[in-house]
């Protein structure tokens, strides 16, 4: 499948860059001191686009927390996987969990510059390959927000199982993807992706979740405070810019 090949090629380049950031963030001097393990699973887009670039800051301020980070595609079992926290995307309602809002993540079309240059209006997207997620209503909601008439029959393109895969395919020119631009700043800065229209649609947010039955440990409390503080700073910066 051509889209799958493009995803692999793109992720090879992006993950090579991010590996350097992750290594720097997690490389702390052990020195024989006692380290408290903290196991966190994060939806892959948030892990790569927000969390990994900031890991160095967390480790510098909390050197004795042994952070163990895993990624998932929004399907996670807190109890079964022995997780302290899971960062998820959605509306904040997961049975048996306590959820705290981290960041909103509205979606907007992203694509290569060459594709963007032939898009004069939102309706022009109907002539392009629209890369789709498992949430089948996203493109319909975006077209409605943009004031363009569209039906499911006019939307064509492959369905991919994660935002990272969608971003990879879009960056390789396979089509246009609806993505959270705030999680893909590195791609936008490097011009691997561009944003042809300002219209956004909200389909969910990122949440920090834990089991309601699990009492927070000191390491969990430190990570939570750091994470919420960082998210609040991003929100404040965005509001100031607006």
Image (spheres, rainbow, N blue to C red):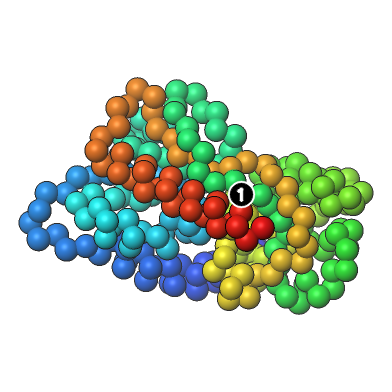
Report the front residue among 171 and 108. Answer: 108
Report the front residue among 40 and 222. Answer: 222
Q: Looking at the image, which residue is at 88% across and 45% down? A: 151
Residue behind mark 1: 105
Instruction: Determine whether, in the image, residue 154 is placed left or right of residue 239.
Output: right
Instruction: Determine whether, in the image, residue 153 is placed left or right of residue 57.
Output: right
Q: Quadrant of residue 76?
A: top left
Q: Looking at the image, which residue is at 50% across and 43% down? A: 102
Q: In the rendered image, which quarter contains the N terminus?
A: bottom right
Give above or below for 24 relative to 69.
below
Give percent across and percent down for residue 123. 89, 58
Report the front residue among 139 and 3. Answer: 139
Q: In the rendered image, which quarter contains the C terminus?
A: bottom right
Give percent across and percent down for residue 241. 62, 61
Q: Quadrant of residue 128?
A: bottom right
Q: Looking at the image, which residue is at 38% across and 68% down? A: 21
Instruction: Determine whether, in the image, residue 189 is placed left or right of residue 25.
Output: right
The answer to whether one can see residue 198 in this image is yes
Residue lying farthest right? 149
Q: Looking at the image, which residue is at 44% across and 27% down? A: 97
Disc 1 element: loop
């Amino acid at each position: 499948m051509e889209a799958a090949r493009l995803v692999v090629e793109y992720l090879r380049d992006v993950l090579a860059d991010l590996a350097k950031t992750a290594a720097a963030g997690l490389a702390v001097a052990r020195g024989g001191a006692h380290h408290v393990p903290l196991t966190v699973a994060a939806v892959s887009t948030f892990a790569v686009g927000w969390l990994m670039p900031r890991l160095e800051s967390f480790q510098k301020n909390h050197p004795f927390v042994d952070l163990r980070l895993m990624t998932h595609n929004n399907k996670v079992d807190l109890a079964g996987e022995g997780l302290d926290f899971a960062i998820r995307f959605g509306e904040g309602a997961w049975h048996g969990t306590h959820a705290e809002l981290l960041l909103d993540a509205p979606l907007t079309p992203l694509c290569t510059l060459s594709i963007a240059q032939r898009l004069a209006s939102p309706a022009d997207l109907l002539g392009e390959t629209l890369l789709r997620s498992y949430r089948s209503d996203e493109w319909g909601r975006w077209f409605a927000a943009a004031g363009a008439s569209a039906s499911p029959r006019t939307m064509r393109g492959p369905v991919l199982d994660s935002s990272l895969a969608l971003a990879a395919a879009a960056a390789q020119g396979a089509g246009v993807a609806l993505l959270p631009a705030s999680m893909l700043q590195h791609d936008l800065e490097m011009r691997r992706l561009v944003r042809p229209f300002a219209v956004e649609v909200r389909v969910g947010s990122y949440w920090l979740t834990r089991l309601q039955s699990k009492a927070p440990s000191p390491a969990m409390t430190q990570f939570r405070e750091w994470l919420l503080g960082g998210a609040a700073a991003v929100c404040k910066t965005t509001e100031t810019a607006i």
